[in-house]
């Protein structure tokens, strides 16, 4: 009887230990991944190829090592994973966004590798030691590379049934490599045809019958379309899906500038105490895309800083900080709005025979149109004084400006 009770107690204890081990295993695994990221443990994370969370953690480690090509390879799809462990999720998502932004501003090139059939194991000289499942998109440095693919890892290691192709990658470009396992068609055997050149017994009088000739215009101008490998219907000869010339004006014009410097000049009109005044205005503005924006965002948020000088019945040196937003980007330009504060340092003692305050703060709103095919920038600002400029009166000013814009696309 004593033995039976002891056995039951032992079994119950083992059950409690088993439940505790099962309950703490996910947390321990997450802690180990966080530790591996902190230590930069590439070898340890690569030893866990079957764990999606370990793959994402490995991408974070490669990002910390500034290996953008491998970081993009291993972080692919991590931001969309709904069950990513909470212990590393924040680090993974933040790093993935930073890597995408860094790649968009780098000289890395986009290369799509497609196999027929898909789902093959492939490798490329640009990433020694890396194996990946096709179809896949890689970001690589410029160079000359061989691509190899096989049905599985054993065939790739044993060099059995390998498909190969060669690619020349240019800086900051897009390319496509296709490896097709379908056997090439054999040329048809030549045929011998007997022709009877005897005089025909029946003669046909009149013009020859009408024959429909094939179109003389080939390629995109013919109007013919085909469906590409990605399921999109395009004109015959349209290679826009495969080749992107970063120096083409249309490509650069459609990409948002990462930062802009605008030198402006215009007219400032001021109203206070029922009296209007007008004078010249000069300014320089710096626009920078907000760091939290996604790469190649067509309607980004901008951080705006401004330094200006104007004469509006008195002389004033101003400085402004604002937040802007590109609200529209039609084919001819970009239209943006801004809202911020404008500080004034006034150099006159009196205004309208009344003592004038030397310092002031205005609320400022702006709108601008930057033309895409020229450096011209058109702008308008409204400034509303938050404090009295003279006793009992606040100033309101409207400023019309034309500017010369210098743009940096980050390429």
Image (cartoon, rainbow, N blue to C red):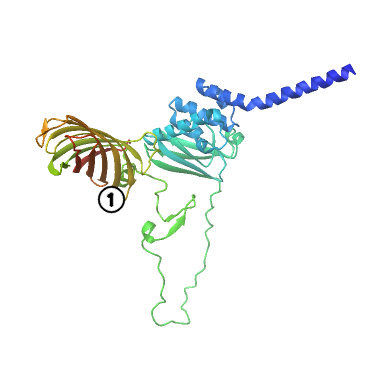
Q: Position of residue 194 (x, y in %)?
A: 52, 68
Query: Which quadrant of the figure has residue 262?
Result: top left
Q: Is residue 307 visible?
A: yes
| Count of number-bearing discs | 1
Q: In which quadrant will I find the N terminus?
A: top right
Nearer-the-camera pick, 11 or 157: 11
Q: In which quadrant will I find the C terminus?
A: top left
**Height in image: 365 above or below 190?**
above
Q: Is residue 233 left or right of residue 118?
A: left
Q: Position of residue 408 (x, y in %)?
A: 29, 37
SS class, disc 1 = loop
Query: Which quadrant of the figure has residue 48?
Result: top right
Query: Which quadrant of the figure has residue 102?
Result: top left
The residue shown at (53%, 61%) is 191
Nearer-the-camera pick, 390 or 87: 390
* Residue closest to the far front: 392
* Residue closest to the far left: 353
The residue shown at (53%, 41%) is 134
Nearer-the-camera pick, 140 or 42: 42
Residue holding disc 1: 332
Nearer-the-camera pick, 49 or 157: 49
Q: Is residue 129 visible?
A: no
Q: Position of residue 34 (x, y in %)?
A: 54, 24
Q: Position of residue 348 (x, y in %)?
A: 11, 31
């Amino acid at each position: 009887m004593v033995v039976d009770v002891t056995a039951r107690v032992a079994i119950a204890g083992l059950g409690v230990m088993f439940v505790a081990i099962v309950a703490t295993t996910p947390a321990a695994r997450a802690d180990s991944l966080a530790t591996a990221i902190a230590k930069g443990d590439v070898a340890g994370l690569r030893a866990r190829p079957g764990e999606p969370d370990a793959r994402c953690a490995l991408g974070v480690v490669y990002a910390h090592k500034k290996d953008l090509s491998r970081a993009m390879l291993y972080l692919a799809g991590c931001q969309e994973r709904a069950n990513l462990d909470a212990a590393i999720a924040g680090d993974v998502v933040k790093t993935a966004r930073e890597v995408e932004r860094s790649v968009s501003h780098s000289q890395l090139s986009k290369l799509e590798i497609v196999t027929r059939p898909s789902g093959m194991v492939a490798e490329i000289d640009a990433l020694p030691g890396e194996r990946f499942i096709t179809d896949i998109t890689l970001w690589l440095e410029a160079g000359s590379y061989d691509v190899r693919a096989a049905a599985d890892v054993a065939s790739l290691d044993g060099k059995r049934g390998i498909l190969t192709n060669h690619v020349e990658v240019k800086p900051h470009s897009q390319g496509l490599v296709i490896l097709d396992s379908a056997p090439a068609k054999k040329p048809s055997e030549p045929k011998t045809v007997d022709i009877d050149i005897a005089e025909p017994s029946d003669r046909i009088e009149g013009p020859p019958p009408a024959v429909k000739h094939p179109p003389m215009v080939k390629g995109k101008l013919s109007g013919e379309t085909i469906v590409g490998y990605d399921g999109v219907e395009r004109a015959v000869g349209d290679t826009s899906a495969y080749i992107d010339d970063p120096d083409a004006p249309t490509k650069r014009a459609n990409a948002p500038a990462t930062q802009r410097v605008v030198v402006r000049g215009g007219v400032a009109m001021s109203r206070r105490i029922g009296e209007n005044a007008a004078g010249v205005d000069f300014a320089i503005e710096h626009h920078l895309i907000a760091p939290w924006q996604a790469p190649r965002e067509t309607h980004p948020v901008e951080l705006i800083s401004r330094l200006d000088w104007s004469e509006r019945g008195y002389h004033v040196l101003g400085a402004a900080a604002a937040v802007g937003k590109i609200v529209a980007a039609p084919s001819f330009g970009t239209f943006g709005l801004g809202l911020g504060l404008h500080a004034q340092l006034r150099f006159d003692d009196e205004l309208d025979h009344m003592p004038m305050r030397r310092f002031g703060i205005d609320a400022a709103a702006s709108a601008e149109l930057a033309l895409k095919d020229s450096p011209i920038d058109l702008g308008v600002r409204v400034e509303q004084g938050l404090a009295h400029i003279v006793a009992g009166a606040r100033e309101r000013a409207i400023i019309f400006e034309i500017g010369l814009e210098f743009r940096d696309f980050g390429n």
